[in-house]
Amino acid sequence: MTTYIMLINWTDQGVRDVRSSPKRLDAAKKLLGDMGGSFKQFYLTMGEYDMVAVAEAPDDAVVARFALILGQGGNIRTRTLKAFPELAYREIIASMG
């Protein structure tokens, strides 16, 4: 499984209905699970982003589809980063010669 960091902001619509946000998070977790992935961690954050999620998924296409489906709801906007664990990082650097 590949790890992804999702940086999330509420839209105006999403923050107006913020009390429903936990239900939307539960629905997102189920959706990603149905797509073969999972949330590993989730945080409400302060600063530039409202929330941060660490997720795993089988491939980039699954995460792209997941993010697009979430965006269609109109409550959040995401920025998704593909994350390489430390071992992969070390292998990438070592392969540079």
Image: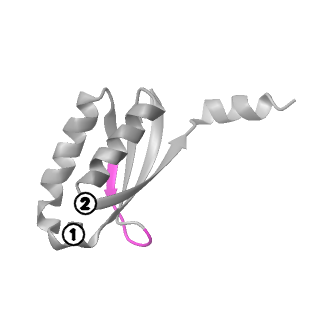
Q: Magenta part of the protein: which range? A: 42-48
Tell which residue pokes out farthest to the right in this image: 97
Tell which residue pokes out farthest to the front in this image: 72
Name the colouring of the figure: one colour
Q: Is residue 91 above or below residue 13?
A: above
Q: Is residue 64 above or below residue 9?
A: above
The residue lying toward the viewer, choosing from 63 and 19, is 63
Q: Are marks 1 and 2 in contact (CB under 8 Å)?
A: yes
Q: Is residue 13 magenta?
A: no
Q: Is residue 4 above or below residue 75?
A: above
Residue 7 % position (x, y): 42, 56
Q: Could you tell me the amino acid type at mark 2? A: Gly
Q: Kindly identify which residue carries mark 1.
A: 13
Q: How many marks?
A: 2
Residue 83 % position (x, y): 54, 41
Real-space Cα distance between discs 1 and 2?
Answer: 7 Å
- Indicate left or right for 35 with 21 as reference: right
Q: Could you tell me the amino acid type at mark 1? A: Gln
The residue lying toward the viewer, choosing from 60 and 90, is 60
Q: Kindly identify which residue carries mark 2.
A: 74
Q: Secondary structure at mark 2?
A: loop
- The disc at residue 23 is none
Give the residue at x 79% y 28%. Answer: 95
Q: Residues within 10 Å of mark 1 (few under 14, many from 20)?
A: few
